[in-house]
Image (tube, grey):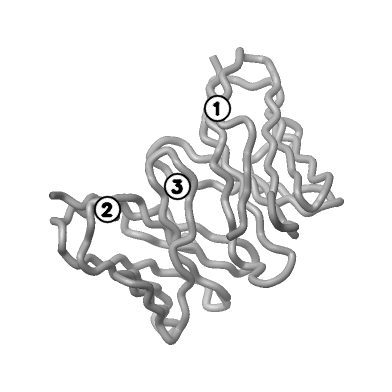
Amino acid sequence: RKEVEQDPGPFNVPEGATVAFNCTYSNSASQSFFWYRQDCRKEPKLLMSVYSSGNEDGRFTAQLNRASQYISLLIRDSKLSDSATYLCVLTGNQFYFGTGTSLTVIP
Amino acid sequence: GAVVSQHPSRVICKSGTSVKIECRSLDFQATTMFWYRQFPKQSLMLMATSNEGSKATYEQGVEKDKFLINHASLTLSTLTVTSAHPEDSSFYICSATLSVGLPDTQYFGPGTRLTVL
């Protein structure tokens, strides 16, 4: 079983829509969780860390559910510029990357 | 924020030649640097973990004699692809973690696109 499982999508949503991604993980000892954003042919950039209490940054909300072993990312009021691949990353003995979820926001 | 640079950003070489890629943390000291490879439409694949002053730890299936990693200082790691072949053509990305503060956060370089003819 993979350490991190992520729905690759693609998710095609209209501007203004709300979209959510989930990422499940298998190692209950995982310590830290992150969402990264990767644009086509570019490097991943840190979007936000994920905490059990949940954290919000503008239109983005991240949540960690340790009991069910998943993290989520919610994007509200989608913009065209949100189109990218979103990677979940967690740390345990090493860093583990999801395969990424592709999001396209359509005008 | 922490900045990581990579050089070169793009390289095209002939089959059989060696290519060196540099990864530098510009405004912080990096405990650990990581080297990834990403093929089109695929996820990042960790190749090796590099700690300053010690030998790199390679992932299963990654040939250490083909992908030479040198981590000479807390701000510089290099990856040398030796005797490159067309199947080595890929996007190589390094990342670094801070020595203090938030060591779990990775900061990525802009990547190096290698094309082997």
Q: Residues within 10 Å of mark 3 (few under 14, many from 20)?
A: some
Type of amino acid under label 1: Arg
Q: Residue at x 58, y 45 (%)?
A: B109
Instruction: Check disc 2 and report its element: helix, strand or loop.
Output: strand
Q: Of tags 2 and 3, which is closer to the observer? A: 2
- Residue A7 appears left or right of B8: left
Q: Please provide percent x and percent y for residue B10.
A: 55, 27
Q: What is the number of the mark on residue B43?
A: 3
User: Residue most toward the right?
Assistant: B53
Residue A1 appears in view: no
Q: CA distance from mark 3 to mark 1?
A: 20 Å
Q: CA distance from mark 2 to mark 3?
A: 15 Å
* Residue B48 in the image, given as x and y percentages of width and height: 67, 47
Q: Which residue: 57% across, 75% down?
A: A31
**Residue occupied by mark 2:** A103
| Mark 1: secondary structure | strand
Identified by mark 3, the residue type is Ser
Q: Are marks 2 and 3 in contact (CB under 8 Å)?
A: no
Task: Kindly indicate the quadrant of the structure image that contains residue B104.
Answer: bottom right
Residue at point 40%, 73% (across, down): A71
**Chain on which label 1 sits:** B
Q: Amino acid at mark 2?
A: Leu
